[in-house]
Structure formats: C-alpha cells, structure tokens
Image (cartoon, rainbow, N blue to C red):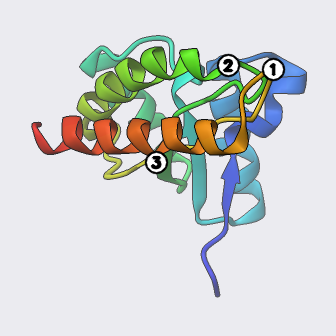
Amino acid sequence: MIPIYLQALSFSDIYGTNENCIHAAAEMASDLGLAGIDIEDRLLKTYEPQYLESLAQRIKSLGVNLGYCGLLVDFSAPVQSITLEVARAKKLSCAIKYLGVSSIRVPGNGVVGGQTTESTFKAVRKKIQQICHDAEQQ
C-alpha cells in the first residue's frame, strides 16, 4: 500500500490554526489506518524541545507517523514576507529533530499586487537558497 499522510492544516476551518488540528488529524489518521500526518509550523505552540518531544510521543502512541513539517506561507502576502519566512524556516529546521522529523516543506509565494511572475519567482528562488544554506549550517 502507498503510504498516505493527512495534512493537519485541513482541520483549520474547525479549530483555527493551532495544535488542535494536529491532534484531530492524528486521531483521524489512526482511525483510517493512514501512515501519518504532515504538520505546519504555525500549528505548533512553541519550539521548546520538551513540548515537541511530548507532541511526537502522543502522535506516535496512536500508531501515526509524522511526515514533514511545513512552513505555512500566506500566498496573498507580498514577497516582503519572505524575510520572516526565512527566519521561521531556520527555527523550524532546528526544531524538527525533537519531533523525529527529518524534512521540512517550503512552498513558494503567490504573485500579488504589483509583483510580476518573474520577480516573484526570483525572490522565491533566493528564499529557497537561503533556507538551504541555513539548514546546511546546522
């Protein structure tokens, strides 16, 4: 069987953007016999190691794996948001080991306002390069 992972952010319409999405996704994944769940950085309360290890243990106790931890990006925000995204990705890269996760997902950004597709994709490329550089330094 192909491993299927449920995106915890799917529960944000019910719970908002918080940890309750993670727990709901883990319970559903367990009920359905899915391989695991994927989570987003903004669903986490903190990056404190004890919190992250405890969260991972609760999820695994349901027989559910954690896939990746994604960086949540506002696709309607201008590329100026990239600076904060890079900083969040750096913190996330340091924190994922406490979840037992070995990868993060980094999305691009939307083309909004007066931005062009070309300028947006240039900025996204630089963002990805910076995140990769920061991750290599850890």
| Circle 3: residue type | Lys
Q: Report the front residue among 133 and 88.
A: 133
| Circle 2: residue type | Pro
Judge whether 1 appears above or below 137 on screen. Answer: below
Say which residue label 2 marks.
Answer: 78
Q: Left or right: where does residue 56 sit relative to residue 30?
A: left
Query: Residue 113: which numbered mark, if any?
Result: 1
Q: Dot 1: few (<14), some (14–19), or many (≥20) neighbours within 10 Å? A: few
Q: State the image coordinates of residue 32 (x, y, percent, origin top left).
A: 77, 62
Say which residue label 3 marks.
Answer: 60
Callout 2–callout 1 Cβ contact below 8 Å: yes
Q: State the image coordinates of residue 26 (x, y, percent, origin top left).
A: 65, 43
Q: Dot 3: few (<14), some (14–19), or many (≥20) neighbours within 10 Å? A: some
Identify which residue is drawn at 80% across, 39% down. 10
- Mark found first going from the N terminus, 2 or 1: 2
Q: Quadrant of the N terminus?
A: bottom right
